[in-house]
Image (cartoon, grey):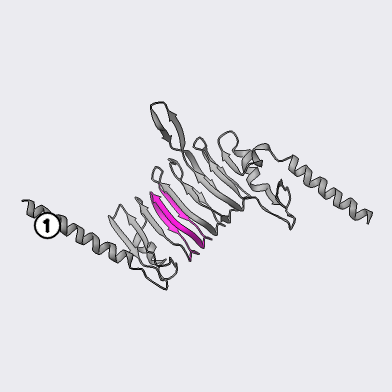
Amino acid sequence: MKLSTHLLGASIVGLAAAISNLPSDCKRSSLSFDSSNAVTLAGCAGLTYSCDGEAVQINGTEVPANCTPYPYQIFIDGNIKGPLAIPGMAEASSITVNGSIVPDKTDNFGAIYTSNITSLDLPDLESVTSSFMISHVSSLSNISVPKLENVSESLKFDLSDGPAIKLSFPGLTYARNISLTGNIDEIEFPALNQTLGLDIYTTGKLDCAKFLKGLVGVVHTGGQGLTCRALLSQTTSTSSSPAPTDTGDSVRSGVQGVLLASAVLMACILAL
């Protein structure tokens, strides 16, 4: 009995030590990465767990049964330059990558400067319980999420300011909404089977017709369409979902557009 009590006490002391050693910046529900703290916060995101409601840092391969990955809100600031890797982070509440907003005395909104992050490597990320969003990045040429399976809300990447890029989501099975914009040469969704909306706009080499052909009959969208627009070929491809019911919204919108155009043309003729 005394031995068991001693082991329990040692366990509690170890847990307390882990809590006391947790950097102060890591005790918050959100982590804001910048050029000065990126290394420290990457360690927090990969080693912090929630054990019976307490945030602790666990340095080891054996994680207690009552502990689960602590889902931080991840913000990656615009002043980070070069590559950023966050190993060990299996789950995040949300992930936001964007540029820097500099207040302007003459403008209530201020100026937005694009981020110079060149690559984002999240080798262990499996789930985002809210949204994963990227915008205002001018140098981002590689995004690696090999284990990502689920994005509960939006997967929205606006890479319009950046270089050519190939996007691959090898394990993603679900994202509520998917919107990808930029100089995109290739997109891979080999495991995707459900989304309520998918909209792609590329100025790169992506073949929209070929891309959508690989998704039709596989990805269920609840009656919504899959849309891909390519600037280089000036073509738009839209495919319907293999959902049980079809609302017909896309067809109605197309007819309404034709009728409206006809009405405008007739009005111009009468005016002459």
Give x and y (percent) for residue 139: 45, 41
Secondary structure predominantly adopted by residues drawn in magenta: strand
The residue shown at (49%, 40%) is 117
Q: Which residue reaches farthest top? A: 105
Q: Which residue reaches farthest bottom? A: 244
From the viewer's perspective, tell me whether residue 199 is left or right of residue 91: left
Classify 104 as above or below 160.
above
Please identify the quarter of the rendering in which residue 263 is found.
bottom left
From the viewer's perspective, tell me whether residue 251 is left or right of residue 223: left
Q: Nearer the viewer, residue 221 or 116?
A: 221
Q: Which residue is mark 1?
A: 266
Give x and y (percent) for residue 272: 5, 51
Q: Is residue 11 magenta?
A: no
Q: Answer whether residue 207 is visible to the viewer in this image.
A: no
Q: Residues within 10 Å of mark 1 (few under 14, many from 20)?
A: few
Give x and y (percent) for residue 73: 57, 46
The residue shown at (52%, 38%) is 77
Give x and y (percent) for residue 264: 16, 55
Classify 184 as above or below 212.
above
The residue shown at (55%, 57%) is 148
The residue shown at (74%, 40%) is 21
Q: Nearer the viewer, residue 211 or 173?
A: 173
Q: Which residues are magenta?
A: 164-193
Please identify the quarter of the rendering in which residue 228 is found.
bottom left
Three-letter residue code for mark 1: Met
Numbered disc total: 1
Classify 96 as above or below 267.
above
- Label 1, secondary structure: give it: helix
